[in-house]
Amino acid sequence: MAINKIQKLYLELIKASSFNEFDGEKVYVDLVENQNLWESVIMDREGFAGMDLIKLRDLSSDCNNVDTLFILVKKSKLDEFAQLTKDWGNDELSIVPSEKASNYLGTTNPKYELVRVWWD
């Protein structure tokens, strides 16, 4: 299945971002080559309640200030996806609990697991 234009933009932001152990190019390639494992992906900051404009602050410095990858992973592909992340250098990999994921996604019956990958 082809990746839609909005998802491509988010993937390009991931590719352009690198810090500490996070290698945006590596994560980008792995995601594109294994798109059969996931539905959609976005990288952001797991913010505080309210407005988080740190990304806006850092854009003029050519910095996409993000630290957390959120992926909707096909439930039957969770183990495969976890294997894919083994050499990403992340500090945490977790499945967001279903109640919290439902709140984040605005649905009570998500078809996918919401996976969180975080780098310090």
Image (tube, helix red, strand yellow):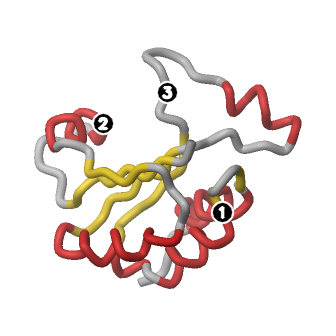
Q: In the rendered image of this protein, does residue 19 appear above or below residue 107?
A: below
Residue identified by numbered label 2: 104
Residue type, label 2: Tyr
Residue at the image point whose x is 35% and y is 67% from the top: 39
Q: Earlier in the sequence, mark 1 or mark 2?
A: 1
Q: Quadrant of the N terminus?
A: bottom left
Residue 6 x/y as whole percent = 56, 60
Q: CA distance from mark 1 to mark 2?
A: 24 Å
Residue identified by numbered label 1: 24
Question: Which is nearer the eye, 78 or 112?
Answer: 78
Residue type, label 3: Gly
Residue at the image point whose x is 30% and y is 36% from the top: 104
Q: Earlier in the sequence, mark 1 or mark 3?
A: 1
Q: Earlier in the sequence, mark 2 or mark 3?
A: 3
For disc 2, the neighbor class at 10 Å (few under 14, some 14 to 19, many from 20) is few
Residue 17 x/y as whole percent = 71, 55
Residue at the image point whose x is 34% and y is 69% from the top: 82
Q: CA distance from mark 1 to mark 3?
A: 20 Å
Residue 100 x/y as whole percent = 22, 35
Instruction: Point out the frontmost of discs 2 and 3.
Output: 3
Residue type, label 1: Gly
Residue identified by numbered label 3: 47
Please tell me whether mark 3 sits on a helix, a strand or a loop.
loop
Could you say which disc has been placed on residue 40 in the image? none
Question: Which is nearer the eye, 73 or 1?
Answer: 73
